[in-house]
Image (tube, rainbow, N blue to C red):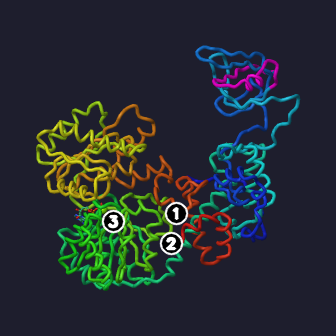
Amino acid sequence: MPRPRHTMPRPLPASHSVDTSDRADSILAALGKSTREKITKLGIHRDLDLVLHLPLRYLDETHIYPIAHAPYGQLAQVEGVVAHAEVRFRPRRQLVCRVEDASGEMYVRLLHFYPSQQKILREGARVRLLGELRAGFLGPEMVHPQVRVVSEDVPLKENLTPVYPTTAGLGQQPLRKLIGRALGVCDLQDTLPPAVLQEYQLAAFAESVKYLHEPPPDAPLAELESRQHWAWQRLIFDELLAQQLSMRRHYARRRSLSAPALAPKKTLTKALIAALPFALTGAQRRAFDEISRDLSARHPMQRLLQGDVGSGKTIVAALACAQAIENKFQAAVMAPTEILAEQHYRKLHEWLSPLGIQVAWIAASVPKRAREEMLAQVASGSAQLAVGTHALFQDQVSFARLGLAVVDEQHRFGVEQRLALHNKGVNPHQLMMSATPIPRTLSMSYYADLDVSVIDELPPGRTPIVTKLVEDTRRDEVIERVREACRTGRQAYWVCPLIEESEKLQLQTALDTYERLSANFPDLKVGLVHGRLKAKEKTEAMAAFKAGKIQLLVATTVIEVGVDVPNASLMVIEHAERMGLAQLHQLRGRVGRGAAKSACILLYAPPLSDMAKARLKIIYEQSDGFEIARQDLTLRGPGEFLGARQSGVPMLKIADIERDHLMLTQARTTAEMLLHTDLPAAERHLARWLARAEQFLKV
Ligand code: ADP
Ligand code: MG
């Protein structure tokens, strides 16, 4: 979408030095404790943050419409005299007033009201009303408008009235005052070099913030609301640039660290490829080439390997490990759950031990004695590869020569876990894997500190999964489907609903479902896995399912990621409307792993919200994880999408990476340019925008 750059005031500021560091924050310092606390809740820690606290929207109180000509369906201000006021009791208690001006009359209706409001809206009072006019039962009406008593000529506002994000106990009025003061005392000089302003046609910072906080009466409201206005555009650019600078600088810092150069020797990797029962897909080869090149470098790799469920990331990770090991270094593979970790262990062991590689299995379920033995092997270097869960790696493992750390499902972890490895005093190469496909704009923004490889092709021979949406009143038919599948030698999953409010309730639901289904299928072996089982019990249940000893596996969402049972061809998901799209897509990816025709039945409970409908439609129509992710991002915005990662990444407050994707590209280019040619400008810009957020990113 082309972005209108319209008429914009210039010229550009001549000087651009900003002093943000040791200014006394006089405005904040003067506040009382309780106001100060509320302000802090809004993320305002410096006077300058007040300037950067931008309006959510605007009210137009700059002029008054004659009642007869006020537009319907949008905020409009009118003024008149209360001609009649009464409390009615039908259909329910409400205050109804008729207000007249020279042009006509209208009604005000308050469904909840206080005596104080009754006093204001008494007959004969002159009132100014701000609200949305609608066609009501009695005529034009406003329901719950903003009401203000006015004496003869109270002047109209000169500017549009900004409405700010705020918190309980802190009104718009005091907030506006503080911001107004901050605009007066803070240094608003530009952080951007004139050449950048020129190139991207950006307005000056000072002018832009003043405009947004105090727009002139003729300001184009629609453009302001859609943030297409030049003043918004300037600040959006600033915010995106700050994010890019922070992440790219972080990236650059890491590149200045040193790591062992693990150039391909092509001994183990070649042997591994030769021994595989399948040929790598083109996408897998490309991804491994990129990783292989990174490993050869003298600075630590920070690469994210993205690929849809079942795209074959594990073998790529195994090849990376093999390259580290053929250089006489160790590798580690970590997964978020023991089920997943064990699956990796089996695969890696199967592939790598024939090549003479010793693989250590580090899990909570391994008896203490054996585990100590494993840890000793890792510490001495006799085990070249260690596989396990995150928790264990953080606490207990020390390596003789760790060269590569592979982290599966990295989106589940924050920066802290990544930190943990560094705290062991090593800088291994790091490969992160994620089966949550990340739309390009998102990875360009929030993953700007990583290199990204994408596996965008599934191995051949997969049968497409048929997805069905079924109302949960038709549960009996679904049960028949399950019986049928299991009777023909296939296996099925039954996924219990996610109950976010209560883990206890979720567990109860899983137990109930298990009981009911066991009663339904006396002739089948039914198993149960849930989050409360001990790791060992989970693993046993999964192993039994994998071996075909269990035909129907009732599960909570613990099976979400990575479980590989090719004979399972049917998945039922209860209350699909409660789950995120990424999660549904992940779950669905558990079937369709073998040659058999597979199906995923999404049970839902009506009535569905519009959002739920929109999401179910996406999962029903799309099988490509990237496309699902893209649509999901548009529906939900990046906050929820990113999960844990956001803890360490400065979140965008005003920019929207989808809407502003053109500017995102420009910000990225500008960040690179500044970091290479004008570090002081980069520092100034970061100081203005990210004084606090920076501390999170020192990985
Ligand atoms: P994911 O990317 O979800 O982690 P996996 O690595 O578990 O996927 O791979 C899914 C399945 O596909 C595994 O059984 C794996 O052995 C198999 N596989 C991986 N690559 C190929 C390939 N190139 N051809 C055929 N099968 C493959
Ligand atoms: Mg996997």
Q: Position of residue 179 (x, y in %)?
A: 75, 52
The quadrant holding residue 123 is top right
The quadrant holding residue 71 is top right
- Which residue carries the number 2 mark? 699
In terms of sequence position, does the residue under pointer 2 or pointer 3 come before the other? Answer: 3
Camera-side residue of 517 and 34: 34
Cα distance between the residues tagged 1 and 3: 21 Å
Cα distance between the residues tagged 1 and 2: 10 Å
Circles 1 and 2: CB atoms closer than 8 Å:
yes
Which label lies toward us, 2 or 3? 3
- Which residue carries the number 1 mark? 648
Q: Is residue 323 visible?
A: yes
Q: Amino acid at mark 1?
A: Gly
- Which residue carries the number 3 mark? 389
Q: Residue at x 56, y 61 (%)?
A: 650
Cα distance between the residues tagged 2 and 3: 21 Å
Instruction: Look at the image and give the residue range highlighted in magenta.
Output: 102-126
Q: Amino acid at mark 3?
A: Thr
Q: Amino acid at mark 2?
A: Val
Which label lies toward us, 1 or 3? 3
Crowd class of label 2 (few under 14; some 14 to 19; many from 20; radius 10 Å): some
Crowd class of label 1 (few under 14; some 14 to 19; many from 20; radius 10 Å): some
Q: Position of residue 49 (x, y in %)?
A: 69, 58
Q: Position of residue 360 (x, y in %)?
A: 26, 74
Q: Quick check: is 116 in the magenta stretch?
A: yes
Q: Is residue 18 visible?
A: no
Q: Is residue 573 left or right of 85 when viewed as pictured?
A: left
